[in-house]
Image: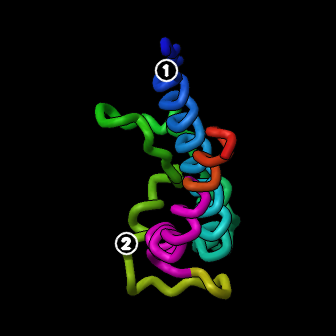
């Protein structure tokens, strides 16, 4: 008995990739939101806080690899110093050094769940 099989592998791979990209971006947005709660603010204003940005995989600017890498950045000349200097005193309640690293590490389970959810959505599961 003859049988016809239609292969949708490339379409499924593209949908999976799109879902993963969307999930990574949602994770980056979540990390940015959490980091904004603890980013140091100088008495003169919140320039560092306002410079925060989440980048989707298509704009994250990483060379090579799978391209499925989102990013969260703070763009001031002193962002790295504020992040790394554990001995700085911060006047904002809850502000801390490692304002990106801590929220990222705390959100790993949520990030994995976001990526999985978006892949399932993209595949219609």
User: What is the number of the mark on residue 77?
Assistant: none
Residue 51 in view of the camera: no
Residue neighbourhood size for the residue with mark 2, other residues' Cα within 10 Å, grouped as few (<14), some (14–19), many (≥20): some
Whole-percent x and y of residue 110? Answer: 58, 68
Q: Residue at x 47, y 60 (%)?
A: 79
Dot 1 lies on which element? loop
Name the residue beneath numbered marker 2: 84
Does residue 87 appear to the left or right of 111 in the view shown? left
Residue neighbourhood size for the residue with mark 1, other residues' Cα within 10 Å, grouped as few (<14), some (14–19), many (≥20): few
Q: Nearer the viewer, residue 75 or 33?
A: 33
Residue 21: name its quadrant.
top right
In the rendered image, residue 9 lying in the magenta stretch gets the answer no
Residue 67: name its quadrant.
top left
Q: How many labels does the image show?
A: 2
Q: Residue at x 47, y 22 (%)?
A: 10
Q: Residue at x 51, y 52 (%)?
A: 73
Q: Earlier in the sequence, mark 2 or mark 1?
A: 1
Position of 34 relative to 10 (above/below): below
**Residue projecting furthest to the left:** 64
Q: Quote the CA–CA distance across marks 2 and 1.
A: 51 Å
Q: Main secondary structure of the magenta part?
A: helix
Name the residue beneath numbered marker 1: 7
* Magenta-highlighted residues: 96-115
Q: Which of 120 and 89 is in front in this view?
A: 120
Whole-percent x and y of residue 35? Answer: 59, 68
Q: Nearer the viewer, mark 2 or mark 1?
A: 1
Q: Residue at x 44, y 70 (%)?
A: 101
Dot 2 lies on which element? helix
Position of 70 relative to 85 (above/below): above
Whole-percent x and y of residue 81? Answer: 39, 66
């Amino acid at each position: 008995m003859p049988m016809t099989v239609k292969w949708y592998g490339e379409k499924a791979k593209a949908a999976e990739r799109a879902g993963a990209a969307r999930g990574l971006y949602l994770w980056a947005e979540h990390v940015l939101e959490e980091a904004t709660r603890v980013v140091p603010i100088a008495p003169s204003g919140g320039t560092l806080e306002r410079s925060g940005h989440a980048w989707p995989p298509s704009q994250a600017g990483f060379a090579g690899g799978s391209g499925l890498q989102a990013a969260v950045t703070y763009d001031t000349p002193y962002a790295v110093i504020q992040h790394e200097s554990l001995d700085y005193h911060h006047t904002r309640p809850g502000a801390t050094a490692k304002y990106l690293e801590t929220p990222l590490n705390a959100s790993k389970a949520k990030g994995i769940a976001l990526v999985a959810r978006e892949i399932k959505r993209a595949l219609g599961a």
